[in-house]
Amino acid sequence: MNTTYRFDARLWEYPGHAAWHFVTLPQDHADEIKVIAAPSTRGFGSVRVEAKINETTWKTSIFPDAKSGSYFLPIKKAVRDTCNLSAGDSANITIILIDLA
């Protein structure tokens, strides 16, 4: 099975005080990741990934979203600033699943 996923997604801001920004993974990718990563999930069902937007790469986790049935990927401020992104913008994203059992 695939462990690298590429997709376009629109950034959204979590409605709260912390101003966290995320993208939601496409459902077909999420369905496959749930199967591949099941033995390797961490706290809150998170899955470790290496993420990339443009030339900016960082390590983080994706988190399951019960509401959408998918995963969401946090996009930290340093990445948003480097890539000139804000809520509502679309980005081409690559994630690679890492630390799988």
Image: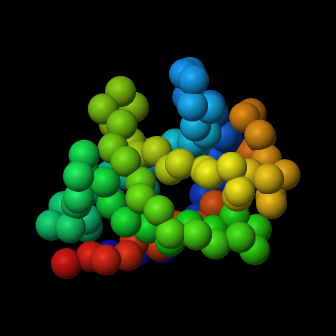
Residue shown at the point (53%, 48%) measured from the top left: 74
Q: Is residue 38 left or right of residue 34?
A: left
Q: Residue lying at the far front in this picture: please name it.
A: 17
Give how far across and how far down residue 68 sits, in percent: 39, 31
Give how far across and how far down residue 26 sits, in percent: 49, 47
**Number of callouts in the render?**
0
Towards the viewer: 68 or 1 = 68
Quarter of the figure with residue 52: bottom right
Q: Is residue 50 visible?
A: yes
Residue shown at the point (70%, 58%) measured from the top left: 79
Q: Residue lying at the far right in this picture: please name it.
A: 84
Q: Is residue 25 left or right of residue 70?
A: right
Say above or below: 56 vs 67.
below
In the picture, the quarter occupied by the C terminus is: bottom left
Residue shown at the point (15%, 67%) measured from the top left: 39
Towards the viewer: 37 or 74 = 74
Give how far across and how far down residue 64 sits, in percent: 33, 44
Quarter of the figure with residue 48: bottom left
Q: Is residue 5 visible?
A: no
Residue shown at the point (25%, 65%) measured from the top left: 37
In the picture, the quarter occupied by the N terminus is: bottom left
Give how far across and how far down residue 15 sits, in percent: 56, 21
Say above or below: 81 vs 39.
above
Quarter of the figure with residue 58: bottom right
Q: How is the image coloured?
A: rainbow
